Amino acid sequence: MSSILNGKKLAVIGDPIEHSLSPLIQQAMLDELGLYCTYGRILVPAGTVAAWLPGTPGMNLAGFNATMPHKADLVPLMDTLSDDARMYRSVNTVVIRDGHFHGHNTDGAGFLRSLLDEDILPEGKKIAVYGAGGAARSVVLKLAAAEAKSIAVCCRTPAKAEELARSSARVHVVALGSPDFERTLAEADLFINCTPLGMQGVPAQFADFRFLDALPASAPVCDLIYRPLKTELLKEAEKRGHQTMNGLGMLIHQAILALELFAAMPLDAALMKKAVEKRLIPVLHQKV
């Protein structure tokens, strides 16, 4: 296959970076497409991305993905920003063309695609989002743009989410444990966990899962975590009869969208997802 990526390199940057699954995911797709392009990891220490960026054209990079702590730092360094990158104030994909840096963010769009894979349509729905960190921001703002009826950001310190609520009339903040929280759950059409509670390697866990009892049985429960593939939250939701989904779809779809940007061409998402899952799922079943 002829492609602008043939003979070029791609990478993911971060600090730390050795844990990143991006090389496995992207290489699976590059191999499936028959492209002569390699994808690696680059350790860029926190706070140094501005100094590192000018050297990238000399590295034969066609672009790179970014993970923590560089996503926000890249925003003012870009020559252009996509609407999503500007909206989230975060860049996870940088396309390098003719020495110029084009910043994108595929997280929110990747999450929407993962919902559609499970026949979950956010338009007109009341959605409860648990957590108000960086992961929640892209999810909440994309759901608002997708015309969800309302999005309740449920968190312990509402003050931290007030700026997020000001970004859209569809978004409001609810304090955990408050009467509003109980009412929000009772009216929710979809529940999404955007915190690391229950993630492999993270000792913190939900104190209990009784809050799920307030959800209507028809409300799907989504966890952005993909390691483990089935968190305790999802197990408890299944016991109560809820449709469940993990964060694997979002992880894969944001990567597919990134590769579409690098390659400047549309991809068969179903084919790419199948190629990635074949390599990725056995790895996710391993303990880290």
Image: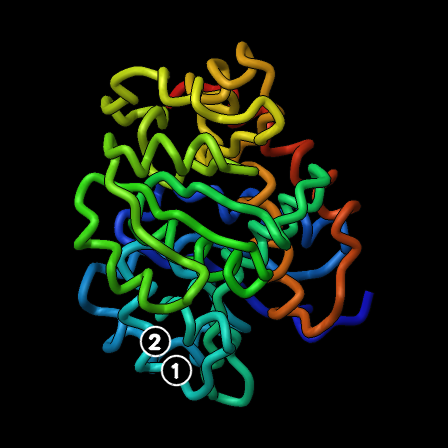
The amino acid beneath tag 2 is Val
Q: Residue furthest top?
A: 239
Looking at this view, is 29 or 113 the one in front?
Answer: 113
Q: Is residue 44 above or below residue 126?
A: below
Q: CA distance from mark 1 to mark 2?
A: 6 Å
Quadrant of image for the N terminus: bottom right
The tag on residue 75 is 2
Q: Residues within 10 Å of mark 2 (few under 14, many from 20)?
A: many
Residue contact at pointers 1 and 2, CB within 8 angstroms: yes
Amino acid type at mark 1: Met
Residue 31 to residue 13: above or below: above
For label 2, the SS is helix
Quarter where residue 260 is shown: bottom right
Give left or right: position of 74 versus 11.
left
For residue 266, what is the image quadrant?
A: bottom right
Residue beneath label 1, please?
Answer: 78
Q: Residue 124 placed where, x, y %?
A: 62, 53
Q: Point out residue 121 in the picture as x, y percentages from the top left corner.
A: 67, 47
Residue at figure coordinates x 45%, y 60% from the top left: 170
Left or right: 282, with 57 as reference point: right
Residue 70: x percent and y percent?
A: 30, 63
